[in-house]
């Protein structure tokens, strides 16, 4: 019996260990965070077997078993688990995010807490699922292509995904990439650069939830706005505008009062999210407010806004996360 099953979809090729054939598909690799968990029976880990391999032009992701270890590799960056040469059943976990890959082998009754603490992780360059592959899967109806019930459904989904973006970024210290302007690690980079970074995470969530993310520069301003587009039953496409500012921006109030409404009007939507990047640290004590709650109370709540506009914050600071208020 062949040990590997191969599938092709256009230029994409997926090779799978036959026992995973019903558990893994192309779509598993088109989400920002993914993982595979299985039990390895006696002797399995001492063999030399491929587990999966996804190949696409410019993108290669694979995992295999060799000499009591699990190996995982993405675009040339690899990691392996601790070695186990015994004959007891073990639990195997392979996980990934857009900036790390990880794997591990534990006794089959291990708790999630133990697994989380002992997983072997390697940082990678930010690696998004290939956009062309995502589009190809949608065309072939191999991703969720269902339309949203209404624009409020899209709105809630995007808002929730922004929370997930913060979790994704902070999980392995990704917030460090938004610091270092001019070589000074104590200064955050420009808003436009932060926005493109955040948009890359949001795009991955959109690939799994059937919405697209677009970044565009504002003429003359150099900033970046986002907007989200998603299919809605009976009404076609819905858009959500997202205007972002650093918490210490001199234009924080102006962004909510003027810029976001203008942007919503320009792209033709009634829904918007005002996103604040909270970047305060012991070496960057700005803004003067203690946390985002206080900033909202002192600055943002004073500004009249449409009921279809909500406030959100991403904590990209050094240190423990502050509390957040949403409205």
Image (cartoon, rainbow, N blue to C red):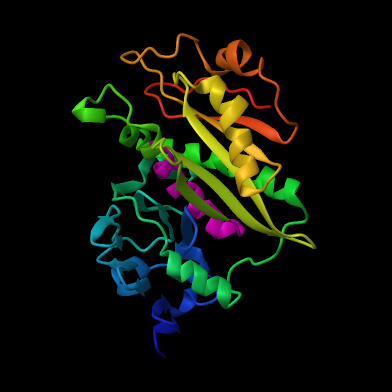
Q: Which residue lies furthest to the left in this view?
A: 183
List the single residue furthest toward the bottom.
1
Image side of residue 77 versus residue 196, left or right: left
Q: Is residue 300 left or right of residue 94?
A: right
Residue 109 horizontal side relative to residue 61, left or right: right
Residue 275 rendering spot, x and y as whole percentages: 54, 32
Q: Which residue lies furthest to the right in this view?
A: 234
- Nearer the observer, 136 or 234: 234
Q: Which residue is drawn at 37% across and 70% down?
A: 44
Image quarter in which the N terminus is found: bottom left
Q: Where is residue 251 in the image (x, y as percent from the top left)?
A: 49, 22
> Where does the magenta region start and end?
194-211
The number of discs equals 0
Residue at image x 48%, y 59%?
37
Quarter of the rendering occupied by the C terminus: top right
Instruction: Confirm whether the magenta stretch covers residue 209.
Output: yes
175 up-or-down from 283: above or below = below
Horizontally, residue 140 falls left or right of residue 59, namely: right
Where residue 202 appears, x then y in whole percent? 50, 48
| Residue 159 seen from this side | no
For the question of whether residue 101 can be seen, the reply is yes
Does the magenta run of residues contain 149? no
The quarter of the picture where residue 58 lies is bottom left
Horizontal and vertical percent for residue 176?
A: 32, 33
Identify the residue at horizontal 32%, vertical 67% (top origin).
Answer: 59
Closer to the camera in the image, 10 or 187: 187
Q: Is the magenta stretch mostly helix, strand or loop?
A: helix
Which residue is rendered at x = 69% and y = 43% of the image?
A: 156
């Amino acid at each position: 019996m062949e040990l590997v099953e191969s599938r092709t979809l256009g230029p994409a090729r997926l090779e799978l260990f036959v026992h995973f054939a019903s558990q893994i598909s192309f779509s598993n690799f088109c989400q920002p965070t993914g993982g595979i968990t299985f039990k390895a029976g006696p002797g399995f880990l001492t063999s030399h077997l491929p587990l999966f391999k996804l190949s696409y032009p410019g993108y290669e992701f694979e995992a295999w078993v060799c000499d009591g270890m699990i190996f995982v590799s993405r675009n040339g960056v690899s990691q392996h688990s601790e070695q186990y040469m015994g004959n007891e059943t073990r639990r195997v976990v392979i996980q990934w995010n857009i900036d790390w890959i990880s794997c591990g082998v534990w006794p089959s009754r291990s708790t999630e807490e133990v697994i989380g603490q002992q997983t072997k992780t390697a940082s990678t360059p930010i690696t998004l699922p290939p956009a062309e592959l995502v589009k190809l899967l949608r065309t072939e109806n191999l991703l969720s292509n269902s339309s949203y019930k209404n624009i409020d459904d899209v709105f809630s989904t995007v808002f929730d995904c922004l929370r997930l973006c913060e979790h994704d970024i902070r999980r392995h210290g990704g917030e460090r990439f938004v610091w270092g302007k001019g070589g000074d690690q104590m200064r955050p980079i420009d808003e436009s650069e932060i926005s493109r970074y955040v948009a890359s995470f949001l795009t991955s969530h959109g690939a799994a939830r059937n919405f697209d993310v677009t970044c565009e520069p504002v003429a003359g301003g150099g900033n970046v706005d986002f907007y989200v587009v998603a299919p809605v039953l009976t009404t076609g496409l819905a858009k959500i505008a997202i205007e972002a500012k650093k918490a210490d921006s001199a234009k924080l109030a102006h962004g909510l009062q003027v810029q976001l409404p203008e942007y919503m009007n320009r792209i033709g939507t009634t829904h918007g999210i005002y996103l604040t990047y909270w970047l305060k640290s012991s070496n960057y004590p700005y803004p003067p407010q203690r946390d985002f709650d206080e900033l909202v109370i002192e600055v943002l709540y004073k500004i009249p806004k449409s009921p279809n506009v909500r406030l959100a914050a991403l904590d990209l600071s050094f240190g423990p996360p502050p509390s957040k208020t949403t409205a």
